[in-house]
Amino acid sequence: MPPERKQNIVMFPFMAQGHIIPFLGLALKLEKERGFKITFINTPLNIKRLQPSIPPNSSIRLLEIPFNSSHLGLPPNAENTETLALDLMLRLIESSPSLKPAFEELICTLVNEQNGQPPLCIISDMFFGWSAEVAHKFGVFHAIFNAGGGYGMAVFHTTWLNLPHKTTDANSNDFPLPGFPKNYRFKSQNLPGHQKAITGPWYFGLEMFQEWLETDAMLFNTVEEIDRIGLTYFRQQFSCHRVRESGRGLLVQEWGPQMEILSHASIGAFLSHCGWNSVNEALSNGVPILSWPMGAEQPFNATMLEEEIGVAVGVANGSDCEVRHEDLVRKIELVMNGTEKGKDMKRKACEAKELIKSASKDKKGLKGSSVKAVDEFLDAALQSWNRLQRSQEMLCTLIHRKPLFKALQLT
């Protein structure tokens, strides 16, 4: 293994379990299988919560970044979305740029600790697109790791960029999605209510998406073989040549043993909110899904699962809808009682399971798409790092590059 494999990778997820979990899974994979040192940055309470999840033989360094929620109009100690209502979750997201000065100071400290040698790369969250500017100030290769799937995030991206959506009638006609195939139509009832009501631009979202253009790489938490539409969208939008995928996240302690449950032979279906970590865990075990999305890109994930892959059937949409028990029973029986629809869903879920398994294969010289993606992403980061070393410009160096899109399959 070449010496640069011992270089440091900085990882910085958003303060939500659905983001921290796949980041930790990626960190453990890069450390165990690739031999990199990992510096994992987050706010003090999240770091404290993470400590029991780091294996005893791991050298992952947990580094606190200062964060005072009270100064940002948030409740005291509000450092994770788990404890927040929706309006406060949005405020936490919008407050993320306040972390920029402290993040830059941490990177400067890491560089000084290594006698002026910068990290190999910085992998940050989709909500921390501003971190690309910090990375490039130090001449460091930057990547955004998107914890969601390509399809859901593509719909999320195009619907926010093309506001307003003044469709409030659930029975109105479907509408096209800019950037998607011309014959593709999106059901208006799958659009979250708050997006239907918006009549002006969501300025934070527009700024965040603009910041994505400054990154050098984008990683997606999915598998290309089952998520081509969304990944094709991002290829076109960012004028890149390659997109790769990443797989399911690693469960953090104190969460329910969802993977263990889903892998049990007696499980016939999974009632899910269609968060992408849960989707990956279900499909990795060949389990059909009863979808009940709650927000964010989850309705779009549900649409893909039902209409594109054929592994899900919708139960409800959102937390304010009424679901009668007889309707739920009918959907469960449709999936689990030996109907043709249920058999077809199970078959397609098992096919997805094999595709995910194949993507992470690395045996006897045969590498799956996600293993190749890891290699290509790290090679790009190493090439950037080597160019920086040759130039001998350790600090305050701006490097203009075309964005490179990759992704990884976590096992």
Image (spheres, rainbow, N blue to C red):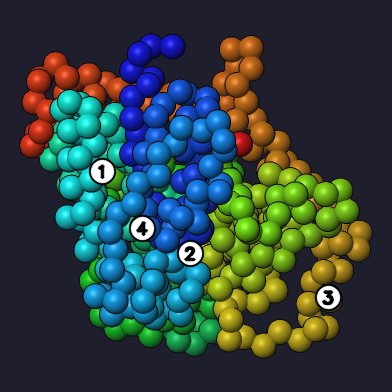
Residue located farthest toward the right when viewing the structure as drawn: 338
Residue at coordinates 30% horizontally, 54% vertically from top-left? 65
For label 2, the crowd category at 10 Å Cα-Cα, with few meaning under 14, some 14 to 19 and many 20 or more, is: many
Q: Is residue 315 left or right of residue 111?
A: right
Name the residue tied to disc 1. 215
Which dot, 4 or 1, sits closer to the camera?
Answer: 4
Label drawn at residue 297? 2
Above or below 185: residue 252: above
Task: Compare marks 2 and 4 and give the one earlier in the sequence.
Answer: 4
Task: Compare marks 3 and 2 and give the one earlier in the sequence.
Answer: 2
Where disc 2 sits, the SS reads loop
Above or below 392: residue 407: below
Q: Are marks 4 and 1 in contact (CB under 8 Å)?
A: no
Residue 132 location, x and y as percent? 22, 46
Q: What residue type is labelled 3?
A: Arg
Name the residue tied to disc 4. 43
Residue at coordinates 55% horizontally, 31% vertically from top-left? 57
Which dot, 3 or 2, sits closer to the camera?
Answer: 2
Task: Compare marks 3 and 4 and give the one earlier in the sequence.
Answer: 4
Label drawn at residue 330? 3
Q: Do the residues labelled 3 and 2 touch (CB within 8 Å)?
A: no
